Image: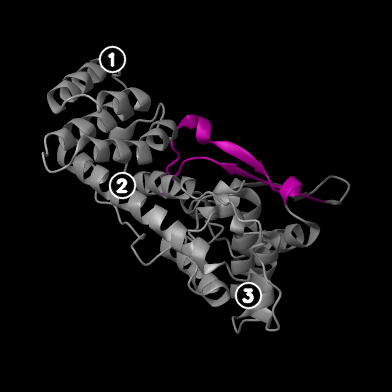
Amino acid sequence: MIREVQEALKDTRAGSTNCIEQLLDDFPQPNAQRILGWVRHLLNDKSINQESIAKYVGCIGRDWLMLTMDEDIDAWGSKEYETIYEQIIQSKVKDGRKKPVMKKESNLIGELAGQIEFSYLNKLKDTQKFTYGRLRTFHDYQRDYYDAPYVYFPWGSNRQVIKANIISPRIYRAMKAYINNSTLEDEQKRLCLVILSLAYRSGLRINELIGIKVSDIADIYVNDDNLIVGKPKIWLRPNRYRRLKSSSASRVIPLACLFKQDEKKLFIEFYHYQERLKRTYLFSQGSGRQPLPSTFFSNMMKVIWDRLLGSMILLFIAFGIQQ
């Protein structure tokens, strides 16, 4: 469909508008209607030439259609839009570097986290800045014509979103070391380490992590022979703090297959600790009747990444995309 749109935009403005109107009849899907409606809206603005419009729709159109296929977009809240837009930003990163990302340096942080060539980052920033601008324009259109919710755009002209697989095993180990060497209390360290290992190994998103209840954890028990069974699984299902996109999004995460032994041991210890305190949510403190807020998860990662990676910006979604 995007190719047809771009071909249509080679015609006169009136001809292009007629072709887009025909495509609106041919593609009734909600996600297609929004991208086609946006193109028609841009054609009404005589200050934007058709070649530019073709570039705009080529920049985000295909990703939008692919990522929103069969979705009930009308029911989306801000988080759903933000997730899709982050993925579109990520899709623009073409990692053609031949040199390794990591550089061995004398200082510990340099060895663990490394640096990326400035020329690569500058090129990446320009690409993502253009995409960011198109997404803002597209979402403004959706707010005006489809009553879409407000969306927070954390990607500005001075920020870069790095390709997800930059969270390599080496950076993961650096993050664990940073937590272990911090001045946090033991309970807080364990909480942060379990969140980190679960995000890294499973690719779960923040809204999925938030809603995990202690009762969602299975296969950690003492059997009839008085032997400890430690093959933890998480049953992801909707609840008041976790809205899954569809019933098919309910699923079982086999942690025993994903964790390394030390990670599994720590997770089981954390589970038993939360269970003894009779907390409802796995990632909670105090009474445990409410989970930790989403900002805790994102800010925790931001603090670590800022310390290890400096000006290079990562988003929590990077854990999920690399899976």
Q: Which of marks 1 and 3 is nearer the N terminus?
A: 1
Q: Say whether disc 2 or disc 1 marks the residue closer to the N-terminus.
A: 1
Frontmost residue, 229 versus 314: 314
Query: Label 2 sits on what residue type?
Result: Leu
Residue 123, position as x, y percentages in the image: 45, 58
253 vs 317, nearest the viewer = 317
Quarter of the image for residue 171 reads bottom right
Residue 49 x, y percent position in the rendering: 19, 39
Viewer-side label of 1, 3: 1
Q: Which residue lies at the image location 63% right of the left edge and 71% below the top edge?
A: 113
Name the residue furthest right. Answer: 225
Q: Is 311 contained in the magenta span?
A: no
Residue bearing the label numbered 1: 26
User: What residue lies at 57% left-to-right and 67% top-to-bottom?
Assistant: 116
Disc 1 residue type? Asp
Q: Residue 166: horizontal and vertical position, in percent?
A: 60, 58
Q: Mark 2 points at which residue?
A: 135
> In the figure, is residue 267 to the left or right of 166?
right
Binning the other alpha carbons within 10 Å of mark 3 as few (below 14), some (14 to 19) or many (20 upward) gives some
- Residue denoted by label 3: 179
Residue 284 visible, this angle: no
Q: Which amino acid does label 3 sit on?
A: Ile
Q: Which of 129 and 268 is in front in this view?
A: 129
